[in-house]
Image: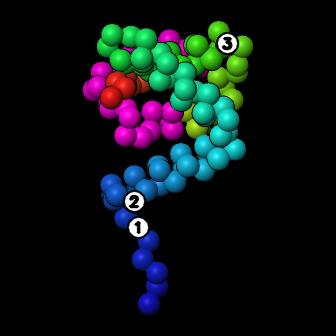
Amino acid sequence: MAEQTPSLWDLSEGERRRDRGIALASLPRGETLTVARETAVALAQARESREASIDDVKRHMEIAGLDPSALDNAAGAVFRGSMWADTGKRIRSARAVARAREIRIWRLL
């Protein structure tokens, strides 16, 4: 019998692929990802709201003389883990290269 291919309409398969992609993108960027995560935590801790976005992280990396584009697709891993919660808030990215795409606001728990 032929091997079954996953349905195009399979949420769990889509989540599995997303998670695998983020993990693969993160591997070669370990040090940059660590700096981005530490930056996110520091920014959130400095705010009463304990909130931060990827734009905040990339802006502060740039101020520190780091290249935020070095994160590449690993940027999706910055707020992963049990220490962050999605606030449900969305803003449009101010970064020109992001073409005003919606980004999430995260809260440090």
In the structure shown, which secondary structural element does the residue marked by tag 2 occupy? helix
Residue identifier under label 2: 13
Q: Tell us which disc is closer to us: 3 or 2.
A: 3
Marks 1 and 2: CB-CB under 8 Å?
Answer: yes
Q: Residue at the location (72% across, 13% down)?
A: 65
Q: Which residues are magenta?
A: 76-102
Image x and y of residue 35, in percent: 62, 28
In the structure shown, which secondary structural element does the residue marked by tag 1 occupy? loop
Image x and y of residue 22, in percent: 53, 45
Near-viewer residue (10 or 66): 66
Image x and y of residue 43, in percent: 47, 15
Residue identifier under label 1: 6
Q: Is residue 7 magenta?
A: no
User: From this viewpoint, is residue 100 visible?
Assistant: no
Q: Quarter of the image holding residue 50?
A: top left
Amino acid carrying label 1: it is Pro
Residue identifier under label 3: 64
- Whichever of labels 1 and 2 marks the residue nearer the N terminus, that label is 1
